[in-house]
Image (tube, coloured by chain):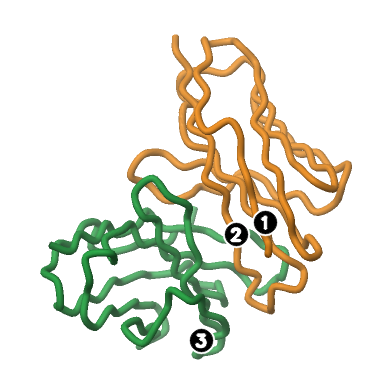
Amino acid sequence: EDQVTQSPEALRLQEGESSSLNCSYTVSGLRGLFWYRQDPGKGPEFLFTLYSAGEEKEKERLKATLTKKESFLHITAPKPEDSATYLCAVQAKYGGATNKLIFGTGTLLAVQP
Amino acid sequence: EPEVTQTPSHQVTQMGQEVILRCVPISNHLYFYWYRQILGQKVEFLVSFYNNEISEKSEIFDDQFSVERPDGSNFTLKIRSTKLEDSAMYFCASRPGREDSPLHFGNGTRLTVT
């Protein structure tokens, strides 16, 4: 069964304190791994797609990396506005033409000034 | 930037009543989805819709649920007889035709069944 596990469940950082979020996955052939940001009461907002092991993507203070079993979202010198829940989702290669996403439970990040 | 819009933002209904949740996907997108998120739980796939028909549905999407694209812009989710356990955030999403394109989500409808 395709599965996504994220850790930690919650992370509290001081402003400027860099850290990483983990997403471990089990999938029958990976088509893509997606990172989303979700603010309270809002829908998931797309951040990155990664397709193959070794790939990296960057956007401002965020960098996503991918191996054959997991992905990391590195946050460098975070600011309070980076506080949100970060969701990881996978798309299975054999998941049908609709390419549905399978989500993890997310990591709730709080960045204190 | 174009976005997925959902209405209403919050819907309260009594158990056994029918509800219709509405979505306007991004205009040039071809695939449409409904997901739900029960408070404190994962975002879960419900159904996908392509070329005016359901292309995939989850076990959650039973006979009480239906989807429709009544015109060129709206995409609706109907729950015929709501149960308490249907209380959740319901998210609509859409994506272009390219296989590796990401899903774009709306801000959801919070459904409360009393």
Answer whether labels 2 and 3 touch (C-beta < 8 Å): no
Please determine if labels 3 and 1 lie on a single subunit.
no
Residue tagged by mark 1?
Answer: A90
Residue closest to the eye, B70 or B72: B70
Q: Residues within 10 Å of mark 1 (few under 14, many from 20)?
A: many
Structural crowding at the residue carrying mark 3, measured as other residues with C-alpha within 10 Å and reported as few (<14), some (14–19) or many (≥20)? some
Q: Which chain is orange?
A: A
Query: What shade does chain B have?
Result: green
Please tell me which residue is depicted at 48% across the width and 67% down the height of the picture: B26
Report the disc number at residue B54.
3
Horizontally, is A58 left or right of B22 in the view? right
Separation (CA) of disc 3 from disc 1: 21 Å
In the picture, which quadrant includes the C terminus of chain B? Answer: bottom left
Identify the chain of the residue marked 2, using the numbered disc in the image: A
Q: Which residue is mark 2?
A: A102
Secondary structure at badge 2 equals strand
Circle 3 SS class: strand
Report if the CB atoms under discs 3 and 1 are less than 8 Å apart.
no
Q: Seen in the image, is A107 located left or right of residue B5?
A: right
Q: Report the amino acid beneath label 3.
A: Ile
At label 2, the amino acid type is: Ile
Residue in view at x 74 percent, y 55 percent: A26
Task: State the image coordinates of residue B111 (x, y, percent, origin top left).
Answer: 24, 61
Instruction: Please name the amino acid that badge 1 sits on.
Output: Val
Q: Are marks 2 and 3 on the same chain?
A: no
Question: So how many labels did they put on this image?
Answer: 3
Near-viewer residue (A78 or B4): A78
Query: Circle 1 sits in a helix, a strand or a loop, which is it?
Result: strand
The numbered mark at residue B43 is none
